[in-house]
Image (cartoon, rainbow, N blue to C red):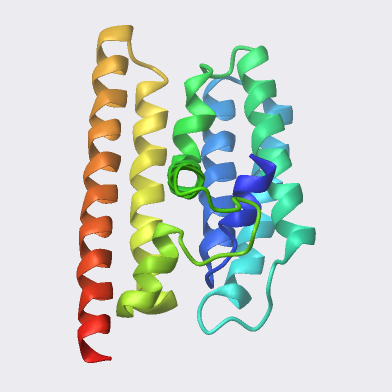
Amino acid sequence: MVNLYNFMDGSDGLAGGMAFIGFGTYALAAYVAHDNQTVLMSASLASAALSFLIFNFHPAKIFMGDCGSIPLGFLAASIGFYGWQHGLWAVWFPILVFSPFIVDATVTLFKRACRRENVWQAHRSHYYQHLVQMGWGHRKTAIYEYILMISVAISALILNQCQWIELVTGLSIWIVIYGIIVLLIDDRWKQFQHAATVIR
């Protein structure tokens, strides 16, 4: 999670928005579970992320860098693990909450590995980077990512209170949604590359 979060810090407002929404969701779930310590810790991180996001949203005046993204990735994983161990949420909860980053980074790394590329080398192959390169820009990409993040967060909070049948259904729906998103962006990216080749 530490490296995944770092990989996703490549567009204005993206990592800050994920931190605000992700840790804010942790805080809400901990509040429901009456764990004031986790509420305070998560809410503090969410508040700090929001303050940072004000200056990091496009056009960004400040940037997070490794010194920000790496600790945030560590905290996202460690608080998620803590909450699971103390019964605040199920093991899938933090994965779903931060799935906008996890899915993008994991699928991208898997595809690069299949192409025998150096997965640790800097690149511009992430799905959010493709959106930026295809003309969405940093602002539009961030806004649509926020919509996805908020939708996932609301779903996670609801599913955390559901029985296993509703849970499996909800998680399955998100798997399908992410699959559709990946396929759509892949298809648009191929069209974009083809058009760029023709123009050249």
Q: Residue at x 58, y 18 (%)?
A: 88
Residue 170: image x %, image y %? 27, 24
Left/right placement of residue 46 relative to residue 197 reads right
Q: Residue at x 34, y 55 (%)?
A: 147
Residue 59: image x %, image y %? 53, 84
- Residue 123 occupies quadrant: bottom right
Of residue 110 and residue 138, the one placed in the foreground of this image is 110
**Number of marks in the rendered image:** 0
- State which quarter of the image contains the C terminus: bottom left
- Residue 50 occupies quadrant: bottom right
Q: Furthest-top residue in view?
A: 164
Q: Furthest-bottom residue in view?
A: 200
Left/right placement of residue 101 relative to residue 167 reads right
Q: Furthest-right residue in view?
A: 67
- State which quarter of the image contains the N terminus: top right
Residue 10: image x %, image y %? 57, 67
Of residue 50 and residue 152, the one placed in the foreground of this image is 152
- Residue 96 occupies quadrant: top left
Of residue 94 and residue 123, the one placed in the foreground of this image is 123
Of residue 117 and residue 144, the one placed in the foreground of this image is 117
Asked if 195 appears above or below 98 in the picture, the reply is: below
